């Protein structure tokens, strides 16, 4: 079976995914099928149907204190509706695709390149790549005023932090060849690279071809390695418009490897996003490991393209031991129009997590096109925390996820989050989710302790699973479980899917679901190789249904 170490080259991901899917259908055809299902069945999320009561409740809470009132005025805005147009895909003749808005970003890259007034070498300002000399001042002088390309030769350059002005390019000689490393005396809150004006904002910033070492070793045995917010990261873009990070490795940050964010995180409540978010950012060919929280994360930002990247082996040290929600790629609070393509993750808590905290708007309109998850605890985890139980408020913003050609290989228990059971997919609280062409491969000898492989639960609605293939989860309790009860999932379609030598129960439908559609669902038994059609009917209206293999 496939094993991806932290040095895996994610440029191989597209070919790996194609080999696992055996090119039975082109990526373009698969994505078009996903989009047809999505727009055919999509329902309006609650936020777009009003939300006045929630806003009134929010105002009472906010204006109870001057600090919160100032926060709303300066940093919070209502989430509102959005258009799908710019986030749709454009296809090249070779079968590659990208979000349509990237054409705007490409034009701005030309503007950035043409606007550079000088190209300098960092060594001209006294920097020495000996791993000892403090080069902070050299970077300040080289970048002063922007409209500059700064070339960094091979070597290890020590700094207490680099702040990039607008219209600046920082270019090394390659991962492992050019290394930027935080000074031993840098604070726990230090960011290795960030933009210079978080509140005012910056534009047109490029970082490429280098390794970023946050130097967590300088903190010795400190238990929690991060200072919160978007501090303590290798690279943070906060309130940046038009930004690029290309072919960069990040190692051992206290918090995140790469954080695309607003000026401040915002927790004004579900239905609100932070002002001053980042827009039009492309992260490509990134690698990261040893991260205290997440490898790549986005917050309150729009139009983010993450491609050909690999995140693996978090330390989890931003959290209390055994309670680390350390994800490879996380699309978090208030993010919108994020496209993930041909990425991979390994040995994280979540491979890809699309989510929000309870007191923030959820990420919305996210697309995943090709992802390889290996030995993550929860390969794909879609949830709005705090909006799960029947007594919780219904999520106003958790909606609109499209995922095509996903692979989950041998999800496992993890010491990162000691009480979390392995899953290939979890959907909680989200509406309008289409997962099409999903390959889940388990270890037939691994003890999944009767847990389900796929879990649709906690008030999720309008979910479509199509072309799901599951194999070898022999010691799981059920392949697909639709949870019932007061916080049940509902309006679920399971279509054209098959399971081979997998769990004893293929689908379990809990109590209280009002509409489940199961069609062309098949399972191959272990002993005689017989293929069974397990579809009970085209439409199931029932309180409790168990579709069970005959042994």
Image (cartoon, rainbow, N blue to C red):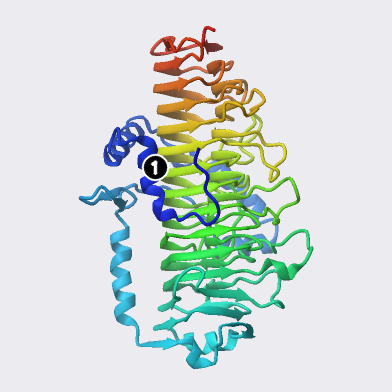
Q: Is residue 414 left or right of residue 276?
A: right
Q: What element does badge 1 sit on?
A: helix
Circle 1 packing at 10 Å, graded few (<14), some (14-19), many (20+), is many
Residue 331: percent from left, percent from top: 51, 50
Residue 391 appears in the rendering = yes
Residue 544: percent from left, percent from top: 56, 12
Number of marks in picture:
1
Residue 279: percent from left, percent from top: 42, 62
Residue 307 in the image: above or below residue 254: above
User: Which quarter of the rendered picture does the C terminus lie within?
Assistant: top right
Residue at image position (20%, 50%) is 93
Q: Name the residue beneath numbered marker 1.
A: 17
Q: In which quarter of the image is residue 469?
A: top left
Task: In this rendered view, identify the residue nearer to me: 27 or 537.
Answer: 27
Task: In this rendered view, identify the residue nearer to me: 23 or 341.
Answer: 23
Task: In this rendered view, identify the residue nearer to me: 48 or 100.
Answer: 100
Q: Quadrant of residue 182?
A: bottom right
- In the image, farthest residue toward the top: 550
Residue 428 appears in the rendering = no
Q: In this view, does 123 lie to the left or right of 497?
A: right
Residue at image position (59%, 85%) is 135
Residue 56: percent from left, percent from top: 58, 46
Residue 452 in the image: above or below residue 322: above
Task: In this rendered view, identify the residue nearer to me: 547 or 130.
Answer: 130
Q: Quadrant of residue 71?
A: bottom right
Q: In this view, does 378 lie to the left or right of 147?
A: right
Residue 127 in the image: above or below residue 484: below
């Amino acid at each position: 079976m496939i094993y991806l170490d932290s040095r895996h080259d994610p440029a191989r991901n597209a070919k790996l995914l194609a080999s696992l899917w055996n090119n039975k259908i082109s990526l373009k055809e698969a994505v078009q099928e996903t989009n047809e299902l999505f727009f055919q069945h999509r329902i309006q999320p609650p936020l777009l149907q009003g939300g006045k009561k929630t806003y009134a409740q929010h105002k009472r809470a906010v204006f109870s204190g001057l600090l919160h009132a100032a926060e709303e005025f300066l940093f919070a805005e209502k989430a509102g509706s959005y258009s799908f147009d710019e986030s749709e895909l454009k296809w090249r003749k070779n079968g590659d695709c990208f979000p349509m808005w990237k054409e705007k970003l490409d034009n701005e890259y030309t503007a950035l390149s043409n606007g550079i007034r000088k190209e300098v070498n960092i060594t001209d300002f006294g920097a020495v790549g000996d791993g000892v000399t403090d080069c902070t001042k050299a970077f300040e002088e080289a970048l002063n005023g922007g409209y500059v390309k700064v070339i960094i030769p091979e070597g290890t350059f020590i700094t207490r932090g680099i702040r990039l002005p607008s219209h600046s390019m920082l270019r090394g000689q390659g991962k492992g060849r050019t290394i930027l490393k935080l000074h031993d005396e840098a604070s726990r809150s230090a960011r290795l690279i960030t933009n210079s004006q978080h509140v005012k904002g910056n534009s047109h910033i490029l970082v490429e071809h280098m390794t970023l070492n946050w130097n967590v070793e300088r903190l010795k045995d400190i238990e929690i390695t991060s200072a919160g917010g978007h501090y303590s990261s290798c690279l943070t873009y906060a309130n940046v418009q038009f930004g690029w990070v290309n072919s960069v490795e990040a190692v051992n940050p206290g918090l995140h490897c790469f954080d695309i964010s607003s000026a401040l995180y915002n927790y004004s409540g579900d239905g609100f996003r932070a002002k001053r978010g980042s827009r039009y950012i492309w992260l490509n060919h990134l690698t990261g490991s040893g991260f205290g929280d997440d490898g790549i994360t986005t917050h309150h930002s729009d139009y983010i393209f993450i491609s050909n990247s690999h995140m693996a082996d978090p330390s989890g040290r931003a959290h209390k031991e055994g309670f680390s929600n350390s994800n490879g790629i996380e699309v978090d609070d208030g993010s919108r129009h994020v496209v993930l393509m041909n990425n991979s993750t390994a040995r994280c808590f979540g491979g890809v997590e699309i989510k929000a905290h309870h007191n923030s708007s959820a990420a919305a309109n996210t697309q995943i096109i090709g992802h390889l998850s290996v030995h993550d605890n929860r390969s794909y985890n879609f949830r709005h925390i705090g909006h799960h139980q029947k007594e919780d408020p219904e999520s106003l913003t958790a909606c609109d996820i499209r995922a095509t050609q996903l692979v989950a290989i041998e999800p496992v228990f993890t010491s990162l989050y000691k009480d979390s059971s392995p899953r290939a997919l979890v959907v909680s609280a989200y509406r309008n989710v289409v997962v099409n062409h999903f390959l889940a491969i388990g270890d037939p000898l691994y003890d999944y302790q009767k847990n389900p492989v796929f879990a649709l639960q906690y008030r999720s609605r309008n979910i479509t699973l199509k072309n799901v293939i599951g194999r070898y989860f022999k010691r799981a309790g059920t392949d697909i479980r639709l949870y019932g009860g007061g916080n049940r999932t509902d309006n679920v379609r399971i279509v054209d899917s098959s399971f081979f030598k997998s769990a004893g129960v293929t689908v379990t439908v809990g109590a209280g679901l009002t509409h489940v559609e199961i069609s062309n669902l098949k399972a191959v038994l272990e002993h005689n190789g017989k293929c069974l059609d397990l579809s009970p009917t085209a439409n199931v209206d029932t309180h409790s249904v168990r579709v069970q293999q005959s042994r």
